[in-house]
Structures are given as C-alpha cells and as structure tokens.
C-alpha cells in the first residue's frame, strides 16, 4: 500500500467540488439533477475579453512569461486598484497567479510557520482552513451568527489574538454567506489589527463587484493597516472567467517578492493567453458587467422569496456574491421513510437523493446549522429547484 504523506492524509477534500462530482455522477446515470453547489457564474465571458485572448494567440504570446505576471498587466491591475479601491499598489507589489486560490496559498506559505495561529471567521470558504493546515499553521475560528449577518466584531477579534497569532483570512463579500462589511465595520477591525504590528490580514475580495449595497470597501484602505494587509482578487467571479485561472494580490513589497519567489519554484507565471485576456478585463469599466450584477441581485431576491415560503428555513439578506446561507437546523431530528436528518450534511444528501438538487452542507464552511445555496443559474432553474426542495422538506416530520 502506498505510504502517502501526512500532509495529504490530513487534507480534507473540497466539499463543493465533491458535491459537484456527486451531482455529475447522477446526471451521467440519467438523473435530472439541478446543481446549486458550485460558485461559478452561468454567464459567458464578455466578448471584448474573448477578443483580447484571440489577439494574444495571433500575436504569439506563447513563450515563458515573467513569474509575477507581465509588467503591463501588473500596471493595469495597479490602475484598477486605484480606480476601484482607492489603493496604491505599485506593479512591483502585484503578483499574478493561477487563480486566487494559488494567490492565497502563496501568501500562506510565505508567512506561516508550523505552529503559527491563523484566525478564520466562521463561516469560511472551505479552502482557507485546509491551506492553513497544509502550511503547518493552526486555524483559530471565530463564530458568528445569522442574526449578526455572519460578521465578526472588533471585540471578538481582540479576544482571539494570542502571542502565536500571525494572520487572519476573511472574504468580503463573503463566500458562503454573501455578507459584506461596511467601512465602519472594517475600521473597527483595523483598529484592533493596528495594535499588533506582526499580525497580517488576508482580505479576499474576489466578489467585490458583485455587491448589492453600493461601493465595495477594501480592508487596505486604512493607512494604519496598509502594510499589514494582503489584498487578494481575480477575474473568475465578476467576469465569469473561472476557466481562465487568473488571480492576483496587492501586498507590501517584501511579501510580493516572497510570493513571486515561491511561485517561481512550482508553477512560474500563469498562462500567457489568460493574462492578456485579464488585462482587457481589469482595464474595463466595471459598468461593462453591470448586467451580471443586476441579474444576481434579482436572483437573490427571488431566492429569498422562495425560501420564505418554506416553513422552518431561516435566512438573512446577503449583500453580495451569489449565495444564500440559510439556517436549516429546525429540520434536525425529523425523518422520512426511516431516514433521519441529524446534520446539515444529512439534509444536503437527503435533498440530493429525494429532490435531485445539489447543495453544500454548512459543515464544510464551519457552520453545522446551515447549507450553502448558489444562485449562479437562471431564474427558471431556481424556481424548479426550490419547488423540489419544498416538496422534499414538507415530507419530513
């Protein structure tokens, strides 16, 4: 039997990817499964971005590229940070990677030593927890509640910091909840962070443009924590470019150089054609994707109205991204035909089997009382999915 490393044996499989794979298996078996499990926009990449990629092929962008990304792309990202976020990141402070997921692991591997503590608010994107473990770090979680829109407070953050704390990772807007921090809420957290100069914050802002409450707020905007903040972003969500695999960071220069150094040893620069397409995306006026944001906003309202018709489901109002994260704990202890629901995972599997709707258990995100529903699909599909969900849940008693 192959003796795999402790590192891989301790790593959990991504629950979102696992549920997606399970739903595909059922679809291949002829089942009419509706998947609301993946965070992938159902829109196609805008034509002007496609044209930039095609032009790159014609212009023979087929050679090795600089490890941190083409200089002119990093210049464009620098301008994007200034335009959209009010942040001053020089091109030398920017590293382009193969997706925001690689951007995150670059930062973690550059800053976290075994035994270092990393604060992760619950609920969290599944990958944060596992990447910290991969680096030998110790995840330290802070619980939140649906009644507080799943946001941590300054007092909670202050109480979680110890002499071993090195970093906090959070997303804003949040995956899986869709919650978005206001400027005032971020300022209160920044005040705490500023008291600990060796404490870094990774602010994952991949959903910044999918925001229903106005101007997105970046953590690095506060001068007192600018040098302690690594801003992570990318083009997968806002521009529906999931398959292009491009993410990037803006960071203090020393950290950016370290990320480039470590990336140079395992992937080098990300795909040349994808980089040229990304340049067109980040240079574009965000108004170019307003139609997508408006569609997501409309779908959010539809999903909330459909959830309101189901007894026993409690939901708050997400302010961004394309997820709802309802509390379904009222169904725990109920059963149908001898099948008892004890956990959110049980309920997710029950809905997959009984309703043929794929969702993701909240346990994957650190919250055992909730499920994540992605509404990155058409309104017709959402209506049919929630019709099935309601019928299946009504069977439980």
Image (spheres, rainbow, N blue to C red):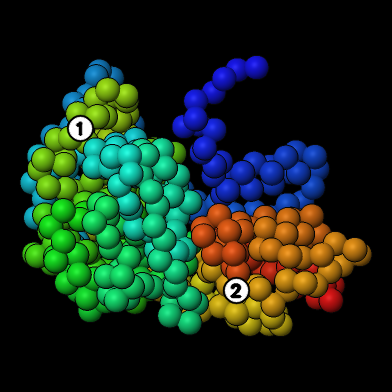
- Residue 136: x %, y % from top left: 37, 39
Q: Is residue 293 left or right of residue 288?
A: right
Q: Could you tell me which residue is drawn at 43 percent across and 49 percent down?
A: 129
Q: Are marks 1 and 2 in contact (CB under 8 Å)?
A: no
Spot the residue most to the right: 337
Q: Which residue is mark 2?
A: 327
Residue 337 occupies quadrant: bottom right
Count of picture labels: 2
* Mark 1 burial class by Cα count in 10 Å: few <14, some 14-19, many 20+: many
Give the alpha-carbon distance from disc 1 to disc 2, as whole Å.
41 Å
Instruction: Judge whether 315 appears above or below 60 on screen.
Output: below
Residue 119 occupies quadrant: bottom left
- Residue 34: x %, y % from top left: 69, 55
In primary-sequence order, the first of circles 1 and 2 is 1
Badge 1 element: helix
Residue 214 occupies quadrant: bottom left
Q: Could you tell me which residue is drawn at 71 percent across and 82 percent down?
A: 311
- Residue 124: x %, y % from top left: 44, 59
Task: Name the quarter where the C terminus is drawn.
Answer: bottom right
Q: Is residue 6 left or right of residue 234?
A: right
Q: Which residue is mark 1?
A: 260
Q: Which mark is residue 250?
A: none
Residue situated in front as seen by the camera: 110 or 288: 110
Q: Could you tell me which residue is drawn at 31 percent across and 70 percent down?
A: 159
Task: Name the quarter where the N terminus is drawn.
Answer: top right
* Mark 2 burial class by Cα count in 10 Å: few <14, some 14-19, many 20+: many
């Amino acid at each position: 039997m192959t003796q795999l490393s402790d590192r891989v044996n301790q790593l959990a499989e991504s629950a979102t990817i696992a549920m997606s794979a399970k739903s595909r298996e059922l679809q291949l078996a002829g089942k009419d499964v509706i998947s609301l499990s993946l965070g992938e926009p159902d829109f196609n990449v805008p034509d002007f971005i496609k044209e930039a990629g095609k032009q790159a092929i014609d212009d023979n962008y087929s050679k090795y590229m600089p490890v941190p990304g083409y200089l002119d792309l990093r210049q464009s990202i620098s301008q994007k940070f200034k335009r959209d976020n009010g942040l001053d990141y020089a091109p030398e402070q920017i590293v382009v990677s193969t997706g925001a997921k690689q951007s995150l692991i670059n930062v973690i591997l550059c800053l976290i030593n075994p035994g270092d503590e990393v604060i992760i608010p619950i609920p969290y994107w599944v990958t944060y927890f596992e990447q910290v473990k991969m680096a030998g770090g110790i995840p330290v979680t802070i619980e939140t509640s649906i009644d507080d829109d799943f946001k941590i407070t300054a007092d909670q953050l202050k109480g979680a910091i110890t002499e071993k704390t090195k970093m906090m990772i959070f997303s804003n807007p949040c995956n899986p909840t869709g919650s978005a921090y206001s400027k005032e809420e971020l300022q209160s957290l920044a005040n705490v962070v500023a008291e600990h100069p060796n404490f870094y914050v990774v602010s994952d802002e991949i959903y910044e443009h999918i925001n229903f409450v106005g101007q997105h707020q970046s953590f690095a905007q506060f001068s007192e924590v600018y040098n302690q903040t690594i801003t992570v972003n990318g083009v997968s969500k806002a521009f529906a470019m999931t398959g292009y695999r491009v993410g990037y960071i803006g960071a203090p220069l020393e950290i950016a150089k370290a990320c480039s150094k470590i990336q140079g040893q395992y992937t080098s620069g990300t795909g040349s054609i994808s980089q040229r397409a990304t340049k067109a995306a980040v240079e574009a006026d965000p108004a170019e994707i307003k139609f997508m944001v408006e569609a997501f906003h409309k779908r959010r309202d539809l999903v909330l109205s459909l959830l309101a018709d189901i007894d026993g489901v409690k939901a708050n109002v997400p302010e961004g991204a394309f997820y709802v994260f309802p509390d379904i704990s009222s169904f725990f202890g109920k059963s149908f035909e001898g099948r008892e629901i004890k956990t959110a995972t049980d309920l997710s599997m029950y809905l997959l089997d009984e309703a043929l709707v794929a969702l993701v258990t909240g346990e994957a995100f650190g919250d055992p009382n909730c499920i994540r529903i992605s509404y990155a699909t058409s309104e017709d599909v959402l209506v049919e999915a929630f019709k099935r969900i309601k019928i299946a849940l009504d069977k439980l008693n």
